[in-house]
Image (cartoon, rainbow, N blue to C red):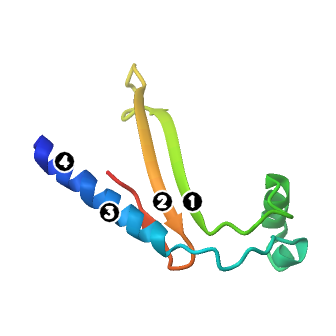
Amino acid sequence: MTASKLFGFDRKVSQEINQMFSKAKVKDASVIRAEDIAQLPSPVQKWITNSGIIGKRKIQSVRLKQKAKLKMKPDQKKWQKASAEQYFTTEEPAFIQPI
């Protein structure tokens, strides 16, 4: 892929991200309560409680960045660096993962 095509793709993704987040308005500033998760299976309740989210505001949008090292084959000697960036919103459910 040529640099100009990559630049065009990056620009398009950036526009989509900006559009997605411009629609993400804070509509519910309530906090997560233990009662909100009472109907979930016990292991899920435990995980959510241990995450520390009880008593915090409900999440409505996320920008998630990850870095990793991975091997493409079991016998590969060197680890390859990888990174990912993902965007989520809940008001109008959306997900973008630039390549």
Q: Categorize mark 2 by other alpha carbons within 10 Å: few (<14), some (14-19), many (20+).
A: some
Q: Residue at x 86, y 64 (%)?
A: 55
Could you say which disc has been placed on residue 15 in the image?
3
Q: Categorize mark 4 by other alpha carbons within 10 Å: few (<14), some (14-19), many (20+).
A: few
Q: Categorize mark 3 by other alpha carbons within 10 Å: few (<14), some (14-19), many (20+).
A: few
Q: Position of residue 95 (x, y in %)?
A: 45, 66
Q: In the depicted view, which residue is nearer to us: 40 or 61?
A: 61
Are discs 2 and 3 less than 8 Å apart at CB?
no
Q: Quadrant of the N terminus?
A: top left
Q: Residue at x 53, y 69 (%)?
A: 89
Q: Residue at x 41, y 30 (%)?
A: 81
* For marks 1 and 2 on the same chain, the one whose residue lies earlier in the sequence: 1
Disc 3 and disc 1: Cα gap in Å?
A: 17 Å
Disc 2 designates what residue? 87
Disc 4 designates what residue? 6
Are discs 1 and 2 less than 8 Å apart at CB?
yes
* For marks 3 and 1 on the same chain, the one whose residue lies earlier in the sequence: 3
Disc 1 designates what residue? 62
Q: Position of residue 22 (x, y in %)?
A: 46, 70
Q: Mark 3 or mark 4: which is in front?
A: 3
* For marks 2 and 3 on the same chain, the one whose residue lies earlier in the sequence: 3
